[in-house]
Each structure stands twice: as structure tokens, then as C-alpha cells.
């Protein structure tokens, strides 16, 4: 840790002595809470316009990191170029008032609707005009207040970094408060007004802290003499630049890991603040730990635990492991936390004297921006899979201190073990067989052997070799090894051959399959004739229009009868292109060659259709188990019902491993006063030919649902009286609870 020369602390004035450091701590606490309240609020506003993609949150994070960087750069320039404290206060107060002109928050309409081909650019532009000004100016609070605190003459003024812990405590509160309190209790407009009120309070506190600093007896910064007047030599300058690069790297890796963990979790469960918040909360908590005067987790402990969690995380990333999703959720969060504590701890150990405080925060912020931009903007272009997450896990091990390295001989041995294990897995063993349950023991035993190797020869390279081997072998043993893979803003799409079917996987969930040979025309998986969706489409044999939100491989196109016209709405251009390619899937080209494919968010594009346009409207736009909540709100379902004929039907495919979405739809139907039916069809043991699914059917009147009632396969779906989701309100935790209760029954 950097040694801080003892400043000749002067006795503070009576006002400052009475208040202590409380005003400064409260100010940085409130500013951080506001900063991290607005992040999920903005993403919540933007997500409905971009299909609920997890990358909405990632790009939003990059925008916020960039604005944070701008705020830190402003604080650095203000404190170094403007020496007079009174002038600093005047400039900052004026900018606070100017930034308040965009309050309360709302998304600008300058850029129109998002372009599916360039959604990230649209999101960045909207952020820059709608949110960035007040966010950037209040994000300067933490370094600015610490710089002011260093001038107060208090006995701890020479080391004000502990205020950064208070700042991150406010960040944690803001993140936790949004999904647990603000989102469930207040509409978006009310949330924006509450944030604006907090901004006004912060403005008063900031100016107050500036005035308190002016009243202190030490109006000039208490910098060590060596910093004030030293002549910087060439060697010293080179050391400074090495140190700056080290700060960037230490900030880059955990920021990239934050994005990787968030993408992994949001893809499997839901794109919602409830699940965006935990990774970011742990990331922020790492700063609280390492910048506290008395850290609750020692540096040595975090460095020792990190390799264990990295190995577990890489193990669970492989589908061969069979680790339950809930357990893997905590493993990935643990890996992120300890990697962040280790990296940020090394940052805290290397923090400079107060004369370079704002520079330190500026470079730390820049590293965070680069890490976030790498994941959100660069990775989708250069990788066809979620490769950045395991790569950053391994990079976190490479940051371990020098004592974790051993001699060059062991380096060569460890590298040989990693390469050899990957080669054996890929070329000697029957790769598809490794994915089967009876062969999984080989993978587990090999993982245990590598962990034991790390324990015997505890070195940085042993950690890396073990981690890389676990990942490489697991990937080689994956059933999708060798699959076609393509990645875009909305996730990773894979196509592979298995069990006589060509299968499309989006994220972690099956998006359709087509059989080879004579059964190529027959819809499979959730759309087979015996499934709830298949039953309705098979029985619909009259001319008319059919609308489908969510293209997949186009399975339902082969239910088209003469005189019927199909329109598919798909937000992901990659999915649309692959489904239309007859070299990959032939449902569209052979069964409905005249079908329309409309690119864009299904709800927004459907709104452009005329009323009473469709006989059947299928809503099947969920990517993985990630739920675009805006497709299940009262306003959304009212739109669907307005687009079907009086005798038309809306089908919602609500199959989900974690949430009771049928309960969500039932409450909306109850508030709208429309009839609802549901069917859960168990089709175990049929592989891709037919798969179990849960479907809800809605209509304008009971007469339209009479054909379903006659079959006896559909049951009445009634609301339990709970609060319905709206565009301003959704309750992911409640839906998860409903699913748990349903399982128990």
C-alpha cells in the first residue's frame, strides 16, 4: 500500500469540528445512490424498445461508465486547473443547475424508433441526450468531495480514500432499492420525479460541503512536499506510466467480468433490474471491502479463494457438468466478487498520495469503460460465442501477485498439461459420448485432478492451466461442439445436428428443430401437432391471416392452409436470415414461401398493423428463459387482443423454468375482462420430435374459445386477484415465487 506522508493537520474550525466528516460522507453516499438508481431506471425505460435483450443492460452500463469517466475527468481538470476553491464551487454549482434542465428523465424521441440493424448506436444516442448531463456532473462528486476533504485540515485529511467506501455503500443502497422498492411501488414517471427531488437535495449538500471547506483553516491542499516541488526524472516518469497502465488493467478485468456474468445470468432467467442488480452490487461491494479502513475480507484470503471460484465457474459453464442452475448462479456471482475484490484490492494497495487522487479515479474509471466497451461493443463483433467471460476469468488469475509464480520448469509442465488435456478430449475420446450421463464421471475426475494439482503446486500458472483445461475439455465435450455459431446484439445463435434433427439454439434454449428425410415437413419440439400450439394450428383450416411474434426456425409455417397468409415478427436479424436459408431450414421456403418477415420488436411492429387483422396471433418471442416483460403487460396484451378478429385467438407460449408466467397472464386477463384458457402438455421421452410446453389462450369472448373447450384438453384460467403487470410495473421476484408455489402443489 502506498505510504501517505503525515500531513501537518491543522485544527478544524468550530463549524467543521462540530459536524465532523459527516456532511462529506452523506454527500458522496447520496450522489452514489442517485447514480445507481438511475442506471436500472434508464435500462427499464429502454428495454421494451429493444426486445428485452440482456445486451440492453450491457450497453447501458458502458454508457454509464463513459459518463462516469467524463465526470471523473471533469473533477480532475477542475481541481488541477482551478486552484481557488471558491471558484471551483461556483463552477460546479453552475453546471449542476445547467444539467438539471433535462429533468425529470424521459427518453428522447429525436432518434425515433430503434433500428434492429444498429440497436447499440440508437441506445447510446438516446442516453447521451436523455440521461448523460446530470449523471456525469453528479458522478464527479466522489473524487471532488475527497479532494475538498483533503483541504479541510482534519487529522485524516491526508488519506480521504475511506470516503470512497461511503460512496459505494450508497451505490449498493441505490441498486437494492430500485428492484425491491422503487420499481414495484412507483410508475416510471414517479421514479423520475423522485430522482429529480434527490438531485436537488444533492445540489444543496454539495454546495454546503464546499462552503464548509472554505471555512476550514487549511484552504490550500495539504500535499506532501515531495509532490509539490519534485523534479520528475525520466525513470520516475516511466515508473509513473507503468503504474497507470497497471491501474487500467486492474480496472479492466473485473469490469469485463461484470458484463460477462450479467449476460450469462440475464440470458438464462430474465432481462430485468431484479437480475441485473446482483452482479453490479457485488462489483460495487468489492470497492467497499478494499477501500474500508478495516476490510472485512483480507487480501490474502481473497487471493487464495479466487482460483477455487474461477475453477468452479468454468466447470459450471460446461454443459457436461450438470450443475443445477440455481447453484451455478451463486458460483458465478462468487467468482465475480472474489475476482473484483482481488483486482480492486491490488488497486487500493497501489493508490497514490492525495495530489494524484483525481488522476487515480480517472484512470480507474477509464479501465472500467474499456472493460465494459470490450464486452458490449467489441466482443459481439469478434466472437461467435460467449467466450469473453471464461477468458476474463483466466485473466483474473494472471493478475495474481508474483509470489504465485514458480520456476520456468513448472511453467512448461503446466502448459503441457493444459494443451494435452484439451487434445485428448477433442481427438481421442468420443466427444458426443462425453456429454452423456454415464461418461460425465471422466470429466469430473479430471477436474478434481487439476484442482489437486493446483493445491500441490500453488502457482499462478497452475491456476491458469487448471482453469484453461477445465474450460477446454468441457467445451470439447459439449453436445454443440462443432456447431455453426453467430453472435449479435441479441445473443448467440447456434445450429447443430443431433439425433437426426437440425437444431437452432438461441442463448441456452431451443428455438426449433427440423427432422431430416421424410419428416422434414413436420413441425417439431414445442410446435408438434400434439402440443398445445400444434393443436390450435392444425385445427385452423380456413383462409385468413396468422401472426407470429418470434420466428425461430419457422416451424408453424408448415401448418399453413391454402388461402392463409403468415406474418412473422422477429427482432434478431441473424435468426431471420438463418430461418430463411433453405440450406439450413426449409419450413419457410417450402411451406410458406410468401410469408412476410418483419424485423423489429414484435410489440412495436405489431402496433403498425390494422385492428382485427389476424385469426391467430402467436406470442413466442422469449429468448432462452429471458422474459421481455414488456410483452406480458396489460397494455401489450390489450394490443394483441385489438389485432385479432372477434372469433380470433391469442396464444402465448409461457413455458419457463423459473417463473409462473401463466399467473402473470391470468391477472392481466382478469383486469381486461377477457376469457383465458391454459394447457400444460407433458411429452417426455420424445426428444426433439415433441416437447412439453405451457400455453395460454386468450380471446375477446368465450365463443371464440369454444373449440378449445370441446377438446377437453384446455382448462379455465382465472386471476388470483394479484396486481397485473403494466408498462410501468413488473414483478419478476413475484413470478419466481409463483413458479415455486406451483411446483409445490
Image (cartoon, rainbow, N blue to C red):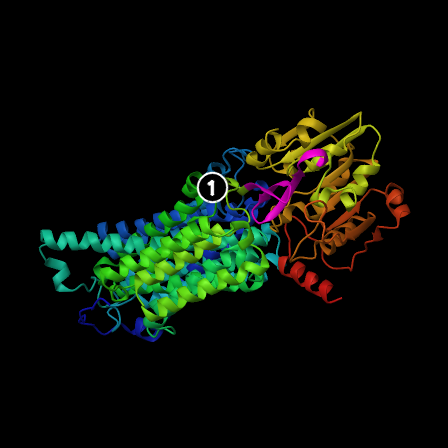
Number of numbered tags placed on the structure image: 1
Residue linked to disc 1: 384
Q: Is residue 549 above or below residue 424?
A: above
Quadrant into which the N terminus falls? bottom left
Position in image of residue 193 (x %, y %): 55, 53
In this view, the residue in front, 699 or 670, is 699
Query: Would you place residue 123 above or below residue 81 in this image?
Result: above
Predominant SS of the magenta segment: strand
Image-quadrant location for residue 591: top right
Q: Foreground residue, 738 or 47?
A: 738
The quarter of the picture where the C terminus appears is bottom right
Residue 265 visible in this rendered orientation of the protein: no
**Coordinates of residue 126 in the picture (x, y in percent):** 49, 40
Q: In this view, does 740 lie to the left or right of 407?
A: right
Query: Viewer-proximal residue, 684 or 557?
Result: 684
Magenta run includes residue 413:
no
Vertical position of residue 637 compared to residue 643: above or below: below
| Point 40% across, 61% down: residue | 205
Q: Judge left or right: residue 149 versus residue 629.
A: left
Q: Is residue 499 magenta?
A: yes
Q: Crowdedness of circle 1 by 10 Å Cα count: few (<14), some, many (20+)?
A: some
Residue 335 quadrant = bottom left
Where residue 735 appears, as percent x and y from the top left, is: 67, 58
* Residue drawn where x is 67% and y is 33% of the image: 568
Indicate the secondary structure of the residue bearing disc 1. Answer: loop
Residue 203 position by quadrant: bottom left
Q: Give the range drawn in magenta.
A: 494-519
Q: Which of 89 and 129 is in front in this view?
A: 129
Viewed as shown, does residue 405 lie left or right of 165?
left
Amino acid at each position: 500500500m502506498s505510504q501517505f506522508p503525515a500531513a501537518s493537520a491543522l485544527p478544524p474550525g468550530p463549524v467543521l469540528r462540530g459536524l465532523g466528516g459527516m456532511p462529506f460522507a452523506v454527500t458522496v453516499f447520496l450522489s452514489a445512490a442517485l447514480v445507481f438508481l438511475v442506471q436500472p431506471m434508464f435500462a427499464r425505460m429502454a428495454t421494451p424498445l429493444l426486445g428485452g435483450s440482456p445486451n440492453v443492460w450491457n450497453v447501458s452500463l458502458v454508457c454509464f461508465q463513459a459518463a462516469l469517466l467524463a465526470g471523473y475527468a471533469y473533477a480532475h481538470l477542475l481541481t488541477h486547473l482551478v486552484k481557488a476553491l471558491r471558484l471551483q464551487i461556483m463552477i460546479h454549482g453552475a453546471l449542476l443547475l445547467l444539467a438539471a434542465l433535462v429533468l425529470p428523465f424521459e427518453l428522447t424521441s429525436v432518434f425515433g424508433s430503434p433500428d434492429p440493424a444498429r440497436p447499440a448506436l440508437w441506445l447510446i444516442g438516446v442516453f447521451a441526450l436523455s440521461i448523460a448531463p446530470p449523471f456525469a456532473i453528479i458522478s464527479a462528486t466522489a473524487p471532488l468531495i475527497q479532494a475538498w476533504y483533503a483541504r479541510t485540515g482534519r487529522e485524516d485529511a491526508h488519506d480521504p480514500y475511506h470516503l470512497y467506501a461511503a460512496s459505494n455503500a450508497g451505490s449498493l443502497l441505490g441498486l437494492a432499492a430500485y428492484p425491491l422498492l422503487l420499481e414495484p411501488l412507483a410508475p416510471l414517471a414517479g421514479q423520475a420525479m423522485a430522482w429529480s427531488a434527490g438531485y436537488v437535495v444533492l445540489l444543496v449538500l454539495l454546495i454546503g460541503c464546499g462552503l464548509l471547506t472554505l471555512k476550514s483553516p487549511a484552504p490550500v491542499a495539504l500535499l506532501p512536499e515531495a509532490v509539490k516541488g519534485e523534479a520528475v526524472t525520466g525513470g520516475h516518469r516511466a515508473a509513473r506510466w507503468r503504474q497507470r497502465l497497471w491501474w487500467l488493467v486492474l480496472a479492466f478485468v473485473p469490469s469485463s467480468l461484470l458484463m460477462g456474468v450479467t449476460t450469462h445470468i440475464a440470458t438464462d432467467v430474465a432481462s430485468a433490474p431484479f437480475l441485473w442488480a446482483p452482479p453490479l452490487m457485488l462489483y460495487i461491494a468489492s470497492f467497499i471491502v478494499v477501500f474500508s479502513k478495516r476490510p472485512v475480507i483480507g487480501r490474502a484470503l481473497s487471493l487464495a479463494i479466487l482460483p477455487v471460484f474461477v475453477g468452479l465457474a468454468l466447470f459450471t459453464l460446461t454443459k457436461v457438468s450438470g450443475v443445477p442452475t440455481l447453484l451455478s448462479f451463486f458460483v458465478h456471482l462468487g467468482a465475480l466478487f472474489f475476482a473484483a475484490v482481488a483486482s480492486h484490492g491490488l488497486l487500493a494497495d497501489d493508490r497514490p498520495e492525495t495530489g494524484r487522487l483525481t488522476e487515480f479515479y480517472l484512470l480507474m474509471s477509464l479501465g472500467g469503460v474499456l472493460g465494459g466497451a470490450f464486452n458490449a461493443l467489441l466482443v459481439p463483433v469478434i466472437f461467435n460465442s460467449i467466450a469473453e467471460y471464461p477468458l476474463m476469468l483466466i485473466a483474473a488469475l494472471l493478475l495474481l501477485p508474483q509470489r504465485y509464480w514458480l520456476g520456468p520448469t513448472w511453467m512448461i509442465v503446466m502448459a503441457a498439461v493444459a494443451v494435452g488435456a484439451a487434445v485428448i478430449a477433442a481427438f481421442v475420446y468420443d466427444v458426443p459420448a462425453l456429454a452423456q450421463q454415464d461418461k460425465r464421471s471422466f470429466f469430473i475426475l479430471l477436474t478434481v485432478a487439476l484442482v489437486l494439482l493446483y493445491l500441490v503446486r500453488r502457482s499462478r500458472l497452475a491456476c491458469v492451466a487448471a482453469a484453461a483445461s477445465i474450460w477446454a475439455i468441457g467445451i470439447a465435450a459439449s453436445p454443440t461442439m462443432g456447431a455453426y455459431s453467430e453472435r449479435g446484439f441479441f445473443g448467440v445463435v447456434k445450429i447443430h445436428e443431433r439425433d437426426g434433427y437440425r437444431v437452432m439454439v438461441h442463448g441456452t434454449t431451443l428455438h426449433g428443430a427440423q427432422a431430416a428425410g421424410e419428416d422434414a415437413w413436420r413441425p417439431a419440439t414445442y410446435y408438434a401437432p400434439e402440443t398445445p400450439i400444434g393443436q390450435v394450428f392444425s385445427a385452423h383450416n380456413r383462409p385468413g391471416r396468422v401472426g407470429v411474434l418470434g420466428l425461430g426456425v419457422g416451424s408453424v409455417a408448415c401448418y399453413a392452409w391454402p388461402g392463409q397468409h403468415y406474418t412473422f415478427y422477429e427482432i434478431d436479424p441473424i435468426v431471420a436470415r438463418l430461418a430463411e436459408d433453405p440450406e439450413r431450414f426449409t419450413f419457410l421456403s417450402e411451406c410458406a414461401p410468401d410469408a412476410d418477415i418483419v424485423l423489429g420488436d414484435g410489440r412495436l411492429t405489431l402496433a403498425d398493423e390494422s385492428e382485427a387483422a389476424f385469426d391467430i396471433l402467436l406470442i413466442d418471442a422469449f429468448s432462452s428463459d429471458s422474459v421481455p416483460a414488456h410483452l406480458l403487460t396489460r397494455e401489450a396484451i390489450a394490443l394483441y387482443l385489438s389485432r385479432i378478429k372477434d372469433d380470433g385467438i391469442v396464444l402465448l407460449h409461457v413455458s419457463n423454468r423459473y417463473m409462473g408466467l401463466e399467473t402473470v397472464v391470468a391477472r392481466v386477463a382478469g383486469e381486461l375482462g377477457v376469457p383465458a384458457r391454459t394447457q400444460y402438455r407433458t411429452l417426455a421421452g420424445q426428444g426433439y420430435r415433441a416437447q412439453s410446453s405451457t400455453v395460454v389462450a386468450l380471446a375477446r369472448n368465450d365463443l371464440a374459445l369454444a373449440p378449445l373447450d370441446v377438446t377437453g384438453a384446455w382448462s379455465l384460467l382465472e386471476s388470483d386477484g394479484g396486481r397485473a403487470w403494466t408498462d410501468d410495473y413488473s414483478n419478476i421476484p413475484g413470478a419466481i415465487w409463483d413458479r415455486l408455489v406451483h411446483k409445490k402443489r
